[in-house]
Image (spheres, helix red, strand yellow):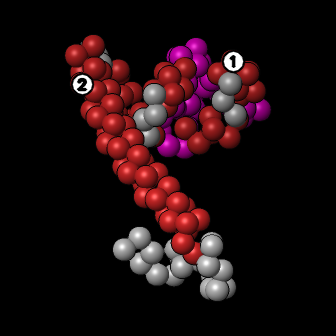
Amino acid sequence: MLIGELSKQTGLSRDTIRFYEKQGLIAVGRKERRFNNYKEYSEHTLQRLFQIKRIKGFGFTLNETASFLDLIETNQASCQNVSEIISEKVSLIDQKIMQLIELRQLMQRSVDKCLQDCCSNAQEPNCPMLTTDFLS
């Protein structure tokens, strides 16, 4: 199938498919080209793109996705291995959530302090939240 059909079936843009090919996530050999030099993509490539889309949908980076694909290619993507990798990702997400909660709290305290202190005393042309150690 041509790239347009591949794009329709996967929901990925042609540019994304070309990018994945350039990054080595999918491959098209010389024999898979038509007489007019158009690339002919196989059913295997279609399935691989669905795998990439699924893995990326879990929030994995391209490098992590490539690692998953390597595991699949070498028949090492056992439930145990995949579960461990996903569990590690969940831990990282939990850490990121905690960091974001802390950042949100800091920002909310800054807004509250600004509304309470400096907005009621509008002598400064610029908000001190951005120019001083505001929360100390």
Indicate the amino acid at tag 1.
Gln
Quadrant (top left, top right, bottom left, bottom right) of the C terminus: bottom left
**Residue corresponding to mark 2:** 84
Q: Residue 19: x and y, percent?
A: 59, 42
Indicate the amino acid at tag 2.
Glu
- Foreground of the two, 30 or 91: 91
User: What residue is shown at x 55% (from left), y 37% (from top)?
Assistant: 21
**Residue corresponding to mark 1:** 9
Q: CA distance from mark 2 to mark 1?
A: 31 Å
Crowding near the residue tagged with mark 1, few <14, some 14–19, many ≥20 C-alpha atoms within 10 Å: few
Asked if one can make out residue 87 in the rendered structure from this viewpoint, the answer is: yes
Instruction: Give the answer, above or below, for where 122 lies relative to 110.
Output: below
- Foreground of the two, 110 or 55: 110
Helix, strand or loop for disc 2: helix
User: What residue is shown at x 69% (from left), y 18% (from top)?
Assistant: 9
- Please say whether residue 38 is one of the residues in the magenta stretch: yes
Q: What are the residue bounds of the magenta stretch?
A: 21-49
